[in-house]
């Protein structure tokens, strides 16, 4: 009887040990993401519009130590180098709609703000001809919104009617407006479940996933929602582990990487991973430079995080880092 008990106990311990080893290996195997520092932005800048076409990351506008700018900067992924494009149309600004707003080889810059208030104009940059074109203005002027592209439509989501920076004054908006790139026209679609600004978004599988944001002065949220353009409806999803605003969201396969941001007190370097298929969260390697108001572009299975502010809004950084999951 004792031998049987000992044998059974040994078997049970072996199963438990094997399970723990497998769990540990899975965690270790997953947590292999690495960060690499790249050539810095030529001047520290936050609140840029950032996107990418091919192996070129395009940055436009933004705020530096001298104030808002209308610079166009081009980062070549292959050569790890920067160059200047044609200046963007005036007025200078920062905090145009965040997110990777590139479509069909163009970068779209939507709204934003400056000392004169919030803006509604829509500008399009062609990196092939190095030329800017002014398109139909957005119905609702705003700063700190986010945008994502599904098919031939740009969806501009949330934002604020203040140009005073993240979580520093509203009113905060739930407004969502759709821009049709084929007809150069705007329409209004279903609003966000809750008003907020300085949020992040990723388009995947014909749907838009929206993360975090500002809900009031120094108040941030962990809310995550999904918009389905086909049904014009929103669905609440598993919240982020760390409530924050002014974050960037990149993607690789079925995973979204919610990186950095601001928790209402200081800049963050957290890197939390949302599994779209499982509606679940995990943690990956933290970003080397804690920051908010950065821009992002996902390319070749990597996430590029460009510029931003650290340790707080108004303290621009030139950091340019890439994450490889």
Image (tube, grey):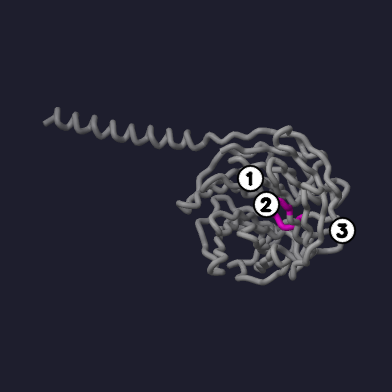
Q: Which residue is mark 1?
A: 298
Residue occupying image coordinates x 74% and y 43%: 307
- Mark toward the start of the polypeptide (2 vs 1): 2
Q: Which residue is mark 3?
A: 91
Q: Is residue 97 above or below residue 177?
A: above
Q: Which residue is mark 2?
A: 100
Left or right for 116, reference 204: right
Q: In the structure shown, which secondary structural element does the residue marked by tag 1 occupy?
A: strand
Q: Are marks 3 and 1 in contact (CB under 8 Å)?
A: no
Which segment is the magenta one?
95-107
x then y, percent, for residue 146: 68, 58
Which part of the image, by quadrant, shows the N terminus? top left
Q: In the structure shown, which secondary structural element does the residue marked by tag 3 occupy?
A: loop
Q: Is residue 280 above or below residue 37?
A: below
Residue occupying image coordinates x 64% and y 39%: 287
x then y, percent, for residue 150: 61, 59
Q: Residues within 10 Å of mark 1 (few under 14, many from 20)?
A: some
Q: Residues within 10 Å of mark 3 (few under 14, many from 20)?
A: some
Queried whether the magenta region covers residue 75, the answer comes back as: no
Q: In the structure shown, which secondary structural element does the residue marked by tag 2 occupy?
A: loop
Q: Using the rendered image of the protein, determine whether residue 320 is visible from the camera's viewpoint.
A: yes
Q: Is residue 222 above or below residue 282?
A: below
- Mark toward the start of the polypeptide (3 vs 1): 3
Magenta residues, dominant SS class: loop
Question: Quadrant of the rendered structure where residue 319 is?
Answer: top right
Left or right for 239, reference 323: left
Queried whether the magenta region covers residue 96, the answer comes back as: yes
x then y, percent, for residue 175: 67, 69
């Amino acid at each position: 009887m004792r031998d049987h008990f000992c044998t059974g106990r040994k078997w049970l311990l072996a199963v438990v040990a094997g399970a723990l080893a497998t769990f540990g290996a899975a965690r270790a195997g997953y947590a292999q993401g690495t960060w690499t520092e790249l050539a810095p932005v030529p001047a520290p800048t936050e609140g840029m519009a950032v996107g990418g076409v091919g192996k070129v990351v395009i940055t436009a506008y933004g705020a530096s130590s001298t104030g808002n700018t209308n610079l166009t900067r081009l980062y070549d992924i292959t050569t790890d180098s920067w160059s200047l494009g044609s200046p963007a149309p005036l007025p200078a600004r920062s905090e145009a709609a965040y997110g990777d707003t590139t479509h069909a080889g163009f970068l779209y810059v939507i709204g934003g703000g400056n000392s004169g208030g919030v803006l509604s104009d829509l500008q399009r940059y062609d990196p092939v001809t190095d030329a800017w074109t002014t398109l139909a203005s957005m119905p609702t002027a705003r700063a700190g919104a986010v945008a994502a592209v599904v098919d031939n439509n740009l969806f501009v989501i949330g934002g604020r009617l203040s140009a005073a920076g993240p979580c520093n004054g509203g009113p905060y908006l739930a407004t969502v407006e759709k821009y049709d790139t084929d007809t150069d026209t705007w329409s209004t679609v279903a609003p966000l479940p809750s008003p907020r600004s300085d949020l992040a978004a990723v388009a995947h599988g014909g749907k838009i996933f929206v993360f975090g944001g500002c809900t009031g002065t120094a108040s941030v949220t962990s809310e995550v929602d999904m918009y389905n353009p086909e049904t014009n409806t929103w669905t609440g999803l598993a919240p982020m582990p760390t409530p924050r605003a002014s974050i960037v969201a990149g993607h690789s396969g079925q995973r979204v990487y919610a990186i950095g941001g601001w928790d209402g007190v200081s800049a963050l370097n957290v890197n939390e991973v949302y599994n779209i298929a499982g509606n679940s969260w995990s943690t990956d390697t933290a970003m080397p430079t804690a920051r908010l108001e950065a821009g992002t572009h996902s390319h070749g299975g990597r996430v590029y995080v460009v510029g931003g502010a650290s340790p707080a809004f108004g303290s621009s950084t030139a950091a340019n880092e890439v994450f490889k999951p």
